[in-house]
């Protein structure tokens, strides 16, 4: 699952399975207003893996180790928009404890290297962490609360996520961590699901040019269809629309006073580039899933 990078790639025991390995490709057709409409596009590649390592042969206590990678490429040559490629690398190290059959606690450290990689410096690395409590009411309903903090180039980011996993019936299920992710899924057949999907992202990358930063924020609402290629591998296609979209370059010291998940608080910084319109997004994702215990 991606938190606010979503921010939190983690093997999740929501929705009846654990997803510790995934890769995706996303394309964003873009329109920039600068003396007229200029069309271009962004391509985003992402991959993440998280492996639980049991401690002392006890399955109720485990370390979580892994990493997430991403690369964003902007094609075309839109006037006034000077970003071409940015990259993200985030090692993941955490601890998970199953306190009882109902309660599970998780803590993660989330350092990140986000930049255009033209001149890697210590200033390109940010730090953060989250803690999560998951409580299962019964076999059909579970709740989660995630709290955390991350340094971001656009200012301090506070993480408050309310999670839900609700089996509404034999075919319907709703799960996610609002306000950054949410899915309503309908089981068309035992191997095919379809439904509604929300993906929220709010991250930033250091740019070498004049020590600026680039903020990538999205709130994509869309429809998905997925099929199981085998007992564990699932392929999902998403067609979405960006209700929220921010692809902007800022000076280093022009920041939000604070951000809650992907909602800015206080006076907004002023972008240096022309406005980029909201629009569609298309994503293809492959993941490896195992039944949650």
Image (cartoon, rainbow, N blue to C red):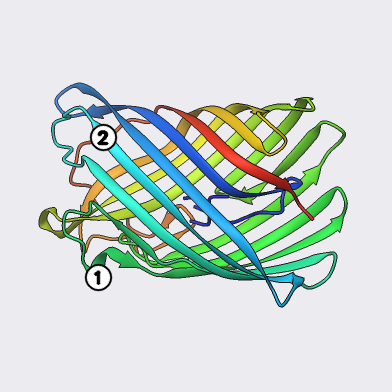
Can you give x and y, in whole percent of width and height, for residue 89 in the image? 37, 56
Can you give x and y, in whole percent of width and height, for residue 90 in the image? 42, 60
Q: Residue at x 14, y 36 (%)?
A: 80
- Is residue 43 found left or right of 242 in the rendered image? left
The quarter of the displayed image where residue 181 is located: top right
- Furthest toward the front, the residue is 57
- Asked whether the viewer can see residue 18, the reply is yes
Residue designated by label 1: 122
Can you give x and y, in whole percent of width and height, for residue 214 in the image? 26, 50
Viewer-proximal residue, 9 or 176? 9
Q: Is disc 2 placed on a helix, strand or loop? A: strand
Viewer-proximal residue, 123 or 93? 93
In the rendered picture of this protein, how many numbered marks are placed on residues? 2
Can you give x and y, in whole percent of width and height, for residue 193 in the image? 71, 28
Which numbered disc covers residue 175? none
- Asked whether the viewer can see residue 97, the reply is no
Q: Mark 1 or mark 2: which comes first in sequence?
A: 2
Residue designated by label 2: 74
Q: Residue at x 69, y 32 (%)?
A: 230
- Is residue 188 found left or right of 51 in the rendered image? right
The quarter of the displayed image where residue 185 is located: top right
Q: Residue at x 67, y 62 (%)?
A: 145
- Is residue 284 found left or right of 38 in the rendered image? right
- Is residue 78 found left or right of 216 in the rendered image? left
Badge 2 crowding class, 10 Å Cα cut-off, few under 14, some 14 to 19, many 20 or more, is: many
Badge 1 crowding class, 10 Å Cα cut-off, few under 14, some 14 to 19, many 20 or more, is: few
Residue 221 sits above or below residue 102 on the image: above
């Amino acid at each position: 699952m991606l938190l606010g990078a979503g921010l939190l790639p983690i093997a999740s025991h929501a929705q009846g399975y654990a997803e510790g390995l995934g890769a995706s490709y996303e394309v964003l057709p873009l329109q920039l207003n600068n003396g007229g409409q200029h069309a271009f596009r962004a391509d985003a590649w992402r991959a993440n893996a998280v492996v639980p390592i049991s401690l002392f042969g006890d399955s109720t206590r485990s370390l979580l180790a892994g990493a997430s990678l991403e690369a964003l490429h902007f094609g075309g040559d839109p006037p006034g928009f000077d970003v071409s490629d940015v990259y993200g690398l985030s090692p993941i190290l955490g601890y998970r404890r199953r306190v009882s059959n109902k309660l599970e606690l998780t803590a993660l450290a989330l350092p990140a290297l986000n930049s255009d990689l033209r001149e890697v410096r210590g200033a390109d690395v940010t730090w953060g962490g989250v803690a999560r409590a998951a409580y299962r009411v019964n076999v059909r309903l579970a709740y989660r609360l995630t709290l955390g903090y991350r340094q971001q180039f656009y200012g301090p980011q506070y993480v408050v996520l309310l999670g839900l996993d609700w089996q509404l019936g034999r075919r319907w299920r709703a799960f996610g961590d609002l306000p950054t992710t949410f899915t309503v899924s309908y089981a068309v057949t035992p191997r095919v699901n379809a439904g509604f999907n929300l993906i929220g992202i709010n991250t930033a990358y250091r740019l070498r040019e004049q020590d600026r930063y680039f903020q990538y924020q999205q709130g994509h609402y869309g429809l998905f269809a997925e099929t199981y290629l085998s007992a564990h591998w699932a392929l999902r296609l998403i067609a979405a629309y960006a209700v929220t979209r921010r692809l902007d370059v800022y000076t280093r010291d022009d920041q939000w006073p604070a951000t809650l998940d992907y909602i800015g608080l206080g006076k907004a910084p002023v972008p240096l580039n022309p406005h980029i319109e909201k629009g569609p997004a298309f994503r293809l994702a492959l993941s490896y899933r195992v039944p949650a215990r």
